[in-house]
Structure formats: structure tokens, C-alpha cells
Image (tube, rainbow, N blue to C red):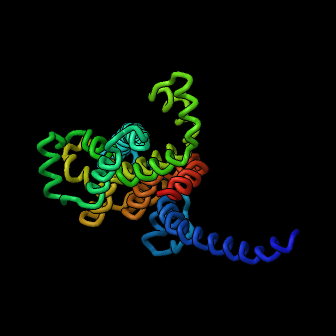
Amino acid sequence: MTKKNIKTLPFDIINTTILTLVAIICVIPFLYVFFISISDGLYLSRGEVSFFPKGVNIEAWKEVITNPRFSIGTGFRNSLVYTLLGTAIAVTFTYLTAYVLTRPRIRFRYFIMTLFVITWVFEAGIIPQYIAYSSLGFIDNIWVMIIPGAINTQYLIITKAYLEGLPKELEEAAIVDGANDFTIVAKIFVPVTKPIIATIALFNAVSIWNQYLIPQMFLHNSNLKTIQQVLANVIVGATESPFANVMVNDVWLNQENMKAAAIMLAMLPIVCIYPFVQKYFKKGILIGSVKG
């Protein structure tokens, strides 16, 4: 071990310790909600569950999923469709727009980018937004979850900065071989820009999945409601009209079980997806932010 490594070792230990503590602090609330969802309602009503679960079971999860009062299945299905379709469209439009805005031959690319930034900085507000969306037929229309967010300016800036950092020789060599823009994007750029694609895909997926205000304003049909709207109905409903305690398979279920199980179900897809894109996410956001 060199002297330089010996000097930096204490700092590495301190950084690791701090990051570990921060990670534990962030995870504890999730664990607490999860433990509540799998605890017996009898112990919850007695106040005997301080952190770790008691009477472990999954009956609350089964009840929330199967009970038609909650409509978890419908909300889950709708949010999944909105997220998959919206993410695919958003990544495609964001990436292609960023590619166009990095081409020197596009004469007005700086002006176009300025227009994007203006729409990002200055927002009209909820009322004008509602009037505009209503006039476009977005009331009770699934496309309200997809089209308005097809290009997010912040993600566009990150993607544009990433593409600007790629070697110019890649494109020049492809042009010499007779490739057009579509070929360059599909066969040259996309394979070497997986980190930024994964990054903006994750950003868009989380944004669409967690969206509550837009669907609450425009999706009034119960068959179109998202998982976040269903979750809000479960929590608000439990507060305004408490669920009656019931016994299922010798396990007591109450409103705390139901709310915790619904919350965990709403978080589960994003929590499961993140580990698979984490390696791309870190690289993409760091490289994309250097030039931005």
C-alpha cells in the first residue's frame, strides 16, 4: 500500500460510514411500513408493534389486492400501461430531439433549445393548463399521461450534454460509409449511449408512476384511475370511514394493515426496477451533468 493510499484511507472510511448511515436512515421508513403491512392487526391495535413485525402474515396484502372496494388491480394495470407507453415515447422523443439539437448543420438549434428552456422556467399555472388540456380533449383520455410529458426539458438537457460528449469521429466515419441520420442513431449512437437512455427512462418511469395531480385533474373515470389515485382513496377512505376490523385465516386485519399494504404495492414496481438500471443510472447522470 502506497503512502497516498494510506493518507486517503481514513477519508474513505469516513465517507463509507456516512453513506451507510444515510442509506440506513432512508431505508428505515420503508421497512417500517413493510413491517406494519405484514403484522397481525391485533398487535397493531394494542400498540405493540414499535418497529419489527409481530404475527407475520400476508393477509393484508391479499385483502387489498382482491377486495373490489380498493380497485388496486385496475389502478395497478392502468399505471403500468401509462408508465410503459409513456416511458417508451418520452425516451424516443427526448433522445431524437437531443440528437437533432447537437447537429451543427441545424441552423436554429440554439433558438429551439431556448424555447425549450423558456417553457421549463416559466409555467402558465394550473388553470391555463386545465383549459388547454380540456380544449385538446384530454379529459378522461389516457394520452394526458403520455403526450404532455413526452419531452421533459431537464432530461433533454442531460441527454444533449451526453451526446455532445461523444467523439465526432463516430458520426464522421458513418457518414463516409454512406449512413443517414436514422442509421447513425440506431447503429452508432444508441449502442454507445445506453447509460443515458437508462437514466432518462428511469426518470420518466418514476415520474409517470408517481404522478398524482395530472390524473386527479383529468382522469375522472374509475376505469382510468392510476395506482396513486387508488392509494389516495384507500388512505383517505380509511381516515374518513375507518375499515372494520375483520379476521381472515385467524389473522386480524385493520386499517393500518390495509394502508401499509397499499403503500407497499404502489412502491414495489419502481423498487424492483431500480437495481437493474442502477449501473447505467450512475454513469449516465454523472457524465450527462458534467457538460450541462
Give residue 73's quadrant in the image: top left
Left or right, 28 with reference to 231: right
Residue positioned 23% across, 53% down in the render: 216
Left or right, 55 with reference to 229: right
Question: Which is more toward the observer, 201 or 218?
Answer: 201
> Is residue 286 among what the camera can see?
yes
Left or right, 99 with reference to 140: right
| Image: 283 above or below 140 | below
Residue positioned 21% across, 39% down in the render: 141
Residue positioned 57% across, 54% down in the render: 282
Question: Which is more toward the observer, 119 or 60?
Answer: 119
Question: Which is more toward the observer, 222 or 253?
Answer: 222
> Is residue 248 among what the camera can see?
no
| Image: 8 above or below 271 | below
Please identify the quadrant where the N terminus is shown: bottom right
Q: Position of residue 25 (x, y in %)?
A: 55, 72
Q: Position of residue 258 (x, y in %)?
A: 39, 58
Residue positioned 52% across, 22% down in the render: 178
Q: Position of residue 150 (x, y in %)?
A: 33, 43
Question: Which is more toward the observer, 78 or 57?
Answer: 78
